[in-house]
Image: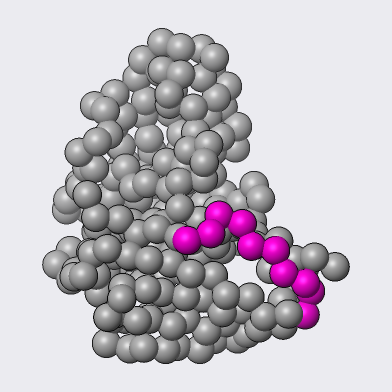
Amino acid sequence: DTAVSQTPKYLVTQMGNDKSIKCEQNLGHDTMYWYKQDSKKFLKIMFSYNNKELIINETVPNRFSPKSPDKAHLNLHINSLELGDSAVYFCASSSSGYTDTQYFGPGTRLTVL
Amino acid sequence: GESVGLHLPTLSVQEGDNSIINCAYSNSASDYFIWYKQESGKGPQFIIDIRSNMDKRQGQRVTVLLNKTVKHLSLQIAATQPGDSAVYFCAETPSPGGGADGLTFGKGTHLIIQP
């Protein structure tokens, strides 16, 4: 069974479009995250979320918004896509302790044309 | 801002040899450190972690060393195998205070295992 899954695996779209990436975890974790990995492989936290609190990295444009329908899902919505949004986006989850291991999904490669 | 970084972008070793991947961090308040392995086309995978109250921790074929004096972290992989070829990241979490904080990753080292 896949612990953290994301869909789609690949997403190619035009500038200006709005798109969503879905994430689901079946680990029973109460905290989920979104990370962005750029072309140089640098990974950066975008959001962390549990059922009580959303923590937003201040460098993330407000065109990006996480939405959590329930504890097992954290979707990423992106409005008005720009060329610079092209990257690989990873979802992760963990229990709520800061030393609890974060488990990553397989990633979604977003290409904005 | 403070960050976690790696010294070498690429490391090539012969199969069977030991490898050492280094990481420097700048936040002296960092409390918890993790090494992740990322294979091509996959998400990062947890390898081993260490708390700031420890100097060394061993796993299966891997050892993490922490030198708080010089703010240096290293990952040693013994008897490397072809499957060890990947990009390795060190990461740290902020000081205790919030379980929902994300990880701060270093830039990554690409480990190549030569046959």
Instruction: Give residue B89's position: percent from left, percent from top.
Output: 49, 61
Kindly identify the residue that appears in the image at 50 percent across and 65 percent down: B36
Q: Nearer the viewer, residue A91 or B21?
A: B21
Residue B72 drawn at (x, y percent): 37, 73
The range drawn in magenta is B7-16
Residue B38 falls in image quadrant? bottom right
Colouring chosen for the image of the structure: one colour
Relative to A104, is B29 on the left or the right? left
Residue at 43% in and 24% down: A84
The residue lying toward the viewer, choosing from B43 and A28, is B43
**Quadrant housing residue A1:** bottom right
Q: Which residue is pictured at 27% across the width and 63% down the height?
A: B26
Residue A76 in the image: x percent, y percent? 38, 35
Specify whether residue A104 is painted magenta.
no
Q: Is residue B13 visible?
A: yes
**Is residue B48 rendered to the left or right of residue B78?**
left
Q: What is the x, y in percent for residue B79? A: 72, 82
Residue B34, quarter of the rendered image: bottom left
- Relative to A41, is B26 above or below? below
